[in-house]
Image (spheres, helix red, strand yellow):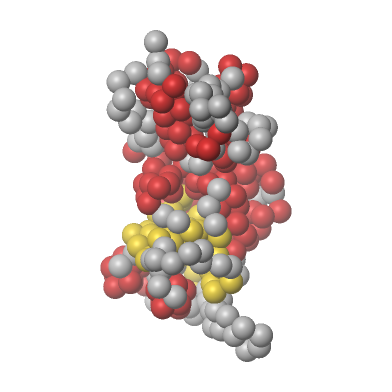
Amino acid sequence: MFTHAQIWQGIDRLAESNGYSPSGLAKKAGLDPTSFNKSKRINPDGKPRWPSTESLSKILAITDSNMSDFFALIDDGKMRVKKITKSDRKEIALETAAILLDTKSVLFNAAKPFTLKSGRASPVYIDVRRLISFPEERSRIMGFSASILAQEVGIGKFDYVAGGETAGIPYAAFIADRLQKPMLYVRKEAKGHGRMAQIEGTLHDKGQKRVVLVEDLQTDGGSKKVFVDALRKAGTKVEHGFVIFHYGIFKESEKNMKKMGLELHALATWHDVLEVAQKGKYFDKDTLKSVESFLNDPERWEA
């Protein structure tokens, strides 16, 4: 027999292990978002309120869990959440890569290289912003994103999700909604009128707030400094950054993260895209060979 506290603890843990807050899990299951709020776990007369079997059934269905999984979360009072393993991480990376290829968010062209914002020549180009127009694929990727942040950072270890102007803003909004976290967005520079604000949104109450910075992608990470500096100047604590896509080929990326005191979390890299492209024969052999050469040594390839 499980106690009232254990049942509610199980719901909290089920939510966290799947990248949701309790209210976010209720909303995803089609329930009133306040169904699992702590204030509703005791009736007005002071007696404990138990979740209905219908509510439990719905949240188990949308998290692809069964009663055995649920009981495993509470049978001994320990946090037995479904962790994302190394194998799961790889599967997420490859599925993300496949989505980027199928939505044509990724382009390969060795014959006519692209010029990146940094000025580098590259046989590969990515436009993660395209994903906002593909609701099914976008939802899948946002599910991955929320789960990774909930487990690698800890859903109770950050207070805000902040999007960097402009490509990071929609993804910060999608993630904040899933995790039921307040959202901010950060401009590259303060706007020149009105409140002259660089950060949009509201930092509630007093005290230092913990923020995760979200952007669409990262090449060498240098562009994040303006956002991190603005957030820290506003009194927030920024220790984690999240991107859908990390180039994963430039040494400067790791150096810049260390300088800024950021830990980077990402769904996929160019190596994942190349692996899927090779297996799925998305491009001809010469193009794939040239791209592989670039990814192994971008400076030498460019020269």
**x and y, in percent, of residue 125 in the image:** 55, 64
Which residue: 51% across, 27% down?
Answer: 46
Q: In the image, residue 63 lies at what x, y percent?
A: 54, 29
**Where is residue 212 drawn, in percent x and y?**
44, 60
Quadrant (top left/top right/bottom left/bottom right) for the C terminus: bottom left
Q: Is residue 98 above or below residue 258?
A: above
Residue at left offset 59%, top offset 64%:
169
> What is the x, y in percent for residue 37?
54, 37
Between 282 and 264, the one nearer to me in the picture: 264
Residue 129, by quadrant, is bottom right
Q: Is residue 116 visible?
A: yes
Say whether residue 182 is left or right of residue 9. Answer: right
- The quarter of the displayed image where residue 210 is located: bottom left
Count of picture labels: 0
101 or 68, which lies in front? 68
On-image quarter of the N terminus = top left
Query: Which residue is at the far bottom?
Result: 192
The residue most toward the front is 45
Q: Please determine whether, in this image, residue 138 is positioned above or below residue 12.
A: below
Query: Residue lying farthest top?
Result: 1
Given residues 146 and 126, the one toward you in this image is 146
> In front here: 62 or 221?
62
Image position of 211 with respect to 278: above or below: below
Residue 251 visible, this orientation? no
What residue is at 38 percent from the left and 66 percent from the top?
208
Image position of 206 with respect to 172: above or below: below
Residue at 50% in and 18% down: 66
